[in-house]
Every structure is written in C-alpha cells, then in structure tokens.
Image (cartoon, coloured by chain):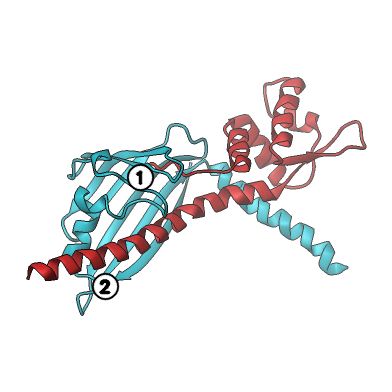
Chain colours: A cyan, B red
C-alpha cells in the first residue's frame, strides 16, 4: 500500500468560528455539502462529533441515486482542526482516506482553510502510473526524431 | 471520507481488471518495460499458462494491454492511457473539494447575512 496526498487551500471571507460551524454542524452542512447538483438532506446527516465518533451523510445525486458517506472522526480541536476518515471495502485501488481540515484565522476576519486528504492506494497503481507516463514518452521519442 | 464517486464505464472496467493481485502483478511486470509472452509472464506464478491467459484476456478487454497479432506467441504490452485515467481519478478528489469549497463560500455569505440581521 502506498500513500497519495492531495492538499487544497482556500481563503474564505468569513471569521473562523463561522467557518468551523459550517463544517461541523449538521444544520449548516446540509446547506452546502456535496458536489454541484447533489443535495445532502438534513435527515440523512448523523454525526457524533468527537474523537472516534462516527458520521454518516448520504448525498442524493442529480439522478436521485443515493451516495452514502460514512466513517469516523479522528482529531477534534475546536476552531483549529479536525480530521475524519474511513476505509473502503469495495474499491480495489483505494483502501482508506483520512482528511484533515485546518482553520487559520487571518486578519480582516478572513479564514484560511487547508484540506489535506491522505489516500492509501494499492502500490501498483502508482508504479503503473509512472510507467504509463514513461511509456507515453517512449512513444513520443520516435515522433520527435521524425 | 468514504465517497462513492460516480465513475464512467472505462474506469469501471479498469478498476475491475485491477481488482485482482495477479493481474496487477502482470501489469507491474509489463510496466518495467517492453513486451512479454504468456510463458514469460506465467513464470513467477504458481499458476498454469492457461490461467495466466485468462487474466491476459481480462486485461486486454479492459484496454490495459494490447497483444501482438502476427506471431504465435502474441506478446503483451502495457497500454498507458487507461492507467493514466485511473490516476487522474485520484485527482478527482481535488476537484470534489474545490467544488465543495465553492459552495461553502456561497453558504458563508448566507450565514453572515443572517448573523448581521440578528445584530
């Protein structure tokens, strides 16, 4: 198994306490969670927001299909950071995901949010991905040589 | 977070083919370079050549390898495109988060408008 981490930063025009609430309170989560075209109905959100507590959110896709999300919370440090994650039983390539969200108060009531998602994948995936690029370049060489 | 990301048919075929450790090992072997015959690919495994042939068919059907048409031996070689799409799939998580933060931005405006009305 190998790890693959993606990190996303965003500066939001709202004070940190408010951003924290948006991420951690079900009444707020229901209003924005999920990709475009998806909804997350309030009655489909169950969270036990504490270290080791479980969460279950079900998103409804544009086609009406349900996409359940579930797992557990890891660290919870109010207003500073929290993490959540879970394992995937039915995905051959990705075994687990652990996401940490950090909240930093900036001047002028701005808040910087740093999302880092650590994914544990089948190690062959990254070996093959590298090989895929190499073989792509192998194909390019003769073209350039004309 | 466990998320069922909607996938397309090619990704489903790619991941189904990658679900088997023998098939992943075959691809990793081909990724190290060049072509290999079914006999060469079967060598490290305690399975028959016939069993390896079945795995090669699955990989070929998924478009992860191509096999020579001319020679009797039909050497296999890796096709990189579907694998690249599979890794790009990991990057979809980034896009999901970007979209989520876009929506959060809008929602925070709402929350602040409500808060100021209560002041």
Foreground pick, B28 / A104? A104
Near mark 1 (Cα within 10 A), the count class, few <14, some 14-19 or many ≥20, is many
Residue A98 horizontal/vertical position (percent)? 35, 47
Residue A100 horizontal/vertical position (percent)? 31, 54
The chain holding disc 1 is B
Residue at 78%, 62% in the rendered image: A140
**Which quadrant is the C terminus of chain B positioned in?**
bottom left
Q: Are marks 1 and 2 in contact (CB under 8 Å)?
A: no
Residue A21 horizontal/vertical position (percent)? 19, 57
Residue at 69%, 40% in the rendered image: B29
Secondary structure of the residue carrying numbered label 2: loop
* B20 over A94 or under it: above or below: above
* Residue, disc 1: B1
Secondary structure of the residue carrying numbered label 1: loop
Residue at 73%, 28% in the rendered image: B42
Residue at 59%, 33% in the rendered image: B16
Is circle 1 on the same chain as circle 2? no
Near mark 2 (Cα within 10 A), the count class, few <14, some 14-19 or many ≥20, is some
* Residue, disc 2: A13
Between disc 1 and disc 2, the foreground one is 2
* Distance of label 1 from label 2 (alpha carbons): 26 Å
Q: Is residue B114 visible?
A: yes
The chain holding disc 2 is A
Query: Quick check: A77 left or right of A85?
Result: left
* A87 over B55 or under it: above or below: below
Query: Quick check: A75 left or right of A95?
Result: left
* B119 over A76 or under it: above or below: below
């Amino acid at each position: 198994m190998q790890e693959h981490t993606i990190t996303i930063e965003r500066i939001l025009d709202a004070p940190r306490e408010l951003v924290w609430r948006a991420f951690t309170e079900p009444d707020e989560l229901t209003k924005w969670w999920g990709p475009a075209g998806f909804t997350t109905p309030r009655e489909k959100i169950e969270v036990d927001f504490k270290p080791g507590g479980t969460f279950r959110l079900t998103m409804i896709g544009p086609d009406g299909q349900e996409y359940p999300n579930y797992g557990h919370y890891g660290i919870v440090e109010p207003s500073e950071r929290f993490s959540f994650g879970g394992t995937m039983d039915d995905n051959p390539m990705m075994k687990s995901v652990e996401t940490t969200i950090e909240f930093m108060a900036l001047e002028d009531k701005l808040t910087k949010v740093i999302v880092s998602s650590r994914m544990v994948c089948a190690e062959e995936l990254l070996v093959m991905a590298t090989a895929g690029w190499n073989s792509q370049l192998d194909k390019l060489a003769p073209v350039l040589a004309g | 977070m466990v998320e069922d990301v909607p996938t397309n048919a090619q990704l489903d075929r790619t991941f189904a083919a990658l679900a088997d450790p023998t098939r992943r090992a075959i691809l990793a072997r081909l990724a190290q370079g060049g072509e290999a015959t079914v006999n060469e690919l079967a060598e490290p495994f305690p399975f028959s050549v016939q069993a390896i042939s079945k795995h090669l068919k699955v990989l070929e059907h998924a478009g992860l390898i191509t096999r020579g048409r001319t020679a009797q031996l039909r050497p296999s070689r890796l096709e990189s495109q579907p694998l690249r799409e599979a890794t790009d799939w990991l990057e979809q998580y980034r896009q999901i988060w970007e979209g989520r933060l876009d929506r959060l931005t809008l929602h925070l405006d709402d929350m602040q408008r409500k808060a100021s009305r209560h002041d």
